[in-house]
Each structure stands twice: as structure tokens, then as C-alpha cells.
Amino acid sequence: MHLPQLIEIHDQFLILSRIGQERFAGTLGGKLLLRGGLGPDGIAAVVAASIGGAASLCVDEDADRLRDGLRAGFVDFVVANLDEALRILKNEIRLGRAVAVGLAAEADPSFDAMIERGLQPDLLSAIPERQAGIFGERGTVALPAATAGLESELSLHSWTIAEDAVRMMPRIARLASESLETAHRETAARLRWLDRSPRYLGRAFGAQQCVRMTDGESAAFLTRLQSELPSAKVTRDRETT
């Protein structure tokens, strides 16, 4: 299975969170993302949606790829027909819970069937132009590129823990969370990322984490890290601190 970079998931999540603030009254709970294909970009979109609290339906005719996603923890269910997928989604969306469903089926007939049955996703990612246009006319929001609209002053900080990750990762995440500026427009999303993402990133990213920070946040974070966890190494963009 080809994986995205962790920063791709992080940035897709920030974009989704921005859309939630601007278009969906501040929440992605109870919203549905429709995605075509579970390649690296698909994993990034589906996992970001789960972290944000949305449901997702990913259509991919490669059942093996979907099952790989299930084993990795990126997808919660893999089904072979649309009726079964919709039964799962209906209940979880009603409860406002995150769930990722993989539908092993051909894309075009599946999207056409959804349109005929009146399914209306809230968000679209990598849907063929014809069907995307129909969904769009009904009010669906297409996801932009993962880097579109991100705050330019936020630099990437990432860390990988080779030993004792179960104990160390939450401690570093706590220091990062406590270093974020309350007033920054992206802080609520970044706090959610640090808190919720480990649950959905799966085993592939279990010893990795990242977050974007302002210069002031970075200084506070790195100072506390050096004082409280001096053995931890954090990379800021391409420079190791």
C-alpha cells in the first residue's frame, strides 16, 4: 500500500476544518465526504475526514486496496454493494459519528446510482467531472488542493519516536498543544488534530506526528521540549532542532 506523507493528511485536515467553519456552522459531524479511489490522496482525504468527525464513502474497484486500508486502520468497513454502505452510513451520520466506509465497486456506475437515488454528499474528492458537476449543482463542496489557503506563517514541525512511542508521543503532543496561541484562527483545528489524529492514523503513523506552528508557538514549544523532554528531536521544516 502506498501511503501519503503525514503532512498531507495534516494539511487536508486543516482545509476540511476551514470548510467546516465556513460552510457547516463549525462542525463536520454528520457530514459525508464522497471520495473516488483509496490511493495516497484518498487515504489523506478519508483519514482527515475521520479526524474531523465526518463520515466518508470511498469507492474503489480494487477490493484488495480497500482491504489493505481496513487492515491499516484507515477504513472502518469494506462492503461490496451500495445498499450495505448506505445502511452503515445512515446510522453513523444520524449520530454524528466519524466512520470510513470503502465500497468495492466500479466508480462510474456507483456514482450514477447515488445520483439516481438522491444521495447528497456534503464534500467531494476526486469524483469524475460529470458526476461532480451534478453533485455540485445540488450544493456539494469540492475539496481544494491540500495546501490551498493554509496560513503562510505556519511552519511544519514533525517528530518520530523510535523507542517508547506509546509513552512519549502523548507527552510531546501535550507540550505542542499547550504552546499553541489561543487566538489563532487555526488553533481549534490544530488542538483537535493533536488530540484525535492518533486514533485514526493507524499503525503506519503510530510513531510519527506533526503540526504547523507560528514562530512564537515554535519558540515556546521547543523551549519546553528541551527542558522537559531533552531526548526528543523535532524537525522544523527541513531544519532539525
Image (tube, rainbow, N blue to C red):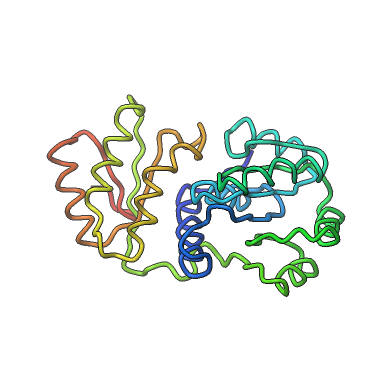
Figure check: 236 above or below 26:
above
Q: Pick out the residue farthest to the left.
A: 227
Residue 171 x %, y %: 27, 35
User: Of 48 and 219, which appears nearest the observer?
Assistant: 48
81 on left or right of 36:
right
Q: Pick out the residue farthest to the bottom.
A: 137
Q: Pick out the residue farthest to the top.
A: 164
186 on left or right of 228:
right
Which image quarter holds the N terminus?
top right
Residue 195 x %, y %: 37, 43
User: Of 23 and 34, which appears nearest the observer?
Assistant: 23
Q: Could you tell me how many numbered marks the image carries?
A: 0
Residue at 70 percent of width and 48 percent of height? 58
User: Of 160 and 173, which appears nearest the observer?
Assistant: 173
Residue at 74 percent of width and 49 percent of height? 59
Figure check: 41 above or below 227:
below
Q: Pick out the residue farthest to the front.
A: 94
Figure check: 224 above or below 107:
above
Residue 66 x %, y %: 70, 39
Quarter location, residue 97 = top right
User: Of 37 and 109, which appears nearest the observer?
Assistant: 109
Residue at 50 percent of width and 54 percent of height? 8
Residue 7 x %, y %: 45, 52
